Image (cartoon, rainbow, N blue to C red):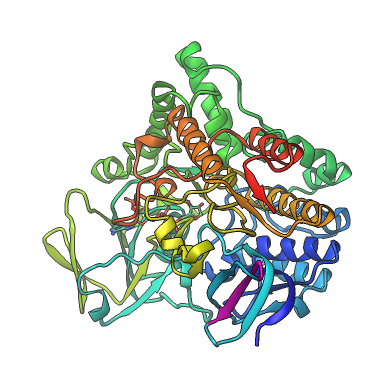
Amino acid sequence: MADPSLDVLIVGAGFGGMYMLIKARSLGLKALAIESAPSVGGTWYHNRYPGARVDIQSLEYSFSFDEALQQEWRWTERYASQPELLRYANHVADRFALRDSIRLETRLAGATWDEDERRWVATSDEGERWSARFLVMASGPLSAPNTPNFEGLDHFAGTTHHTADWPHEAVDFGGQRVGVIGTGSSGVQAIPEIARQARSLTVFQRTAAYAVPSHNGPLDAAWEARVKADYAGFRARNRLMRTGFGCELPPHMVSALAVSPEERESRFEERWAYGGFALLGTFYDIMLDLRANEFAAEFVRAKIRATVHNAQTARRLSPTQPIGCKRLCVDSGGYYETFNRSNVQLVDLNEAPLERITPRGVFADGREHELDVLVLATGFDAVTGTLMRTKLQGRDGLSIQEKWRPGALNYLGLAVAGFPNMFNIAGAGSTSAFTSVIQSIEHHVNWICECIAWLDTQRLTTIEATVHAEADWMAHVQAMAEQTVFLSCNSWYMGANVPGKPRLFMPLTGGFPAYVERCAQVATNGYEGFRVS
Ligand code: NA7
């Protein structure tokens, strides 16, 4: 028997699901969050590989909705590590007494829109059933691990770990011959840590990564005090940034093409010394103009050449795609320096394709690389993966798989035509991938809850994006991406990392403030682009 009394069923108890729960409760809604993992924390529960840490500064990658919470929580490092982020997630669950409304180890098997009842009927894979007026997918844009279909993978006799599904007991690499496939953010973070422990490490690289230093360290107490003296103001200034963070070093509103080589170099050096994503804001047009971008790219390549002793290795580590086109990697472990170690070797899969996995290792480069442990740092079926692996049926039996066959169609990143009363947090079509995602989560949840409150005051039961509004939004997302360098490489932003996935640029590049304003306008205009009844 389905529980008929839920207002909101929330799928996921990471930061998105937990904030949705807090906010829904504050409106007096009866809400339940279901979470497949045995813990809250989402990303920070699963991605516990060595070196895992956030790539945005902790003071900016944290909840802002509660002044007491942001004042009391003390981050120990400038960029928080996975264990600390998981502690923070648990602290939030306890502080807001969320646990009695979270069902752990409960995976959504499917959900179907019941048109007669105007409710979602959902089931878990254990056969539990819920009925809810609203379904909120807070299942995370980077939560479905991508395991490439390497020939022979199942026959590898050693141990295989995926960075996004890391074991809970410590993995001891001591004395082991380790291979890592993948050099995105996860690989870049894990490789230096593994190299320090392993007997040997072989890195199999398909695309070289741009890694910028984070200059991580203990959180500067004076900076923390200054931010906390006016945390609300700091957050408000961040919300005016295109990325929702970085207000202390905003993008320099000058073209990289308009300055002398000496000035360009010195400005890049300043940002390199500051660390993190700030480098991409050295000039306003780095992500807009390939010529400007090339200056930044070459600046990093020069750093690689200056760091890596072996010229051939340095060349292989030097990316050729535009910088930032794939997400920039923020390095706290000394990624490039790692390749100077005598126990580390790099295999460039472009020169020497990975042919198969054998029981003893990886066959690439025309030979077998013998391994005891294989680490897959091969990323995610990003943004759409989790929903596409779930049986979601909207109006008239429309499945999400059918709906999204051409790509992740959506309106405002929050809704999908044909799926009434279903909302997405940090999904395709929003700016969330380019922001501090917690800022985006707060915005999405606030918007969704205001929408539900509005429907209730209007005595309406159903809201659904129109196909027309959805098509316009998709055109807008594509048009914005075309103004940038983001279409010039094969990134997860466009589904290019997963064979067979439709290539459609998924995040919105227009900047967080413009997106927030558009969402607000839609609401002010009586939920323009939605059909309500
Ligand atoms: P990413 O950034 O998608 O990186 C995955 C890496 O794995 C990347 O280097 C891929 O190369 C590589 N990869 C994927 N499939 C293959 C195959 N079949 N063969 C060889 N190499 C492969 O995932 P991460 O987990 O590192 O980071 C994801 C996000 O989490 C990150 O952007 C941050 O937002 C946090 P490719 O580049 O596709 O050629």
Q: Is residue 138 rendered to the left or right of residue 100?
A: left
| Residue 122 part of the magenta segment | yes
Q: Vertical placement of 480 versus 105: above or below?
A: above
Q: Vertical placement of 350 versus 39: above or below?
A: above
Q: Is residue 356 rendered to the left or right of residue 107?
A: left
Q: Is residue 308 rendered to the left or right of residue 296?
A: left
| Residue 138 part of the magenta segment | no
Quarter the C terminus occupies? bottom right
Of residues 191 and 524, the one nearer the viewer is 524
Dividing the picture into quadrants, the one containing residue 83 is bottom right
Q: Position of residue 184 (x, y in %)?
A: 41, 52
Q: Where is residue 270 in the image (x, y as percent from the top left)?
A: 58, 29
Q: Vertical placement of 105 versus 22: above or below?
A: below
Q: Where is residue 25 in the image (x, y as percent from the top left)?
A: 82, 66
Magenta residues (range) = 117-124
**How many numbered circles are shown?**
0
Q: Where is residue 77 in the image (x, y as percent from the top left)?
A: 68, 55
Answer yes or no: is residue 57 visible: no
Q: Tell me which residue sits at (57%, 77%) in the image.
A: 36
Residue projecting furthest to the left: 366
Answer yes or no: is residue 215 visible: yes
* Ligand 1 quarter of the rendering: bottom left
Q: Is residue 383 rendered to the left or right of residue 121?
A: left
Of residues 3 and 259, the one nearer the viewer is 3
Quarter the N terminus occupies? bottom right
Of residues 518 and 255, the one nearer the viewer is 518
Q: Tell me which residue sits at (35%, 35%) in the image.
A: 488
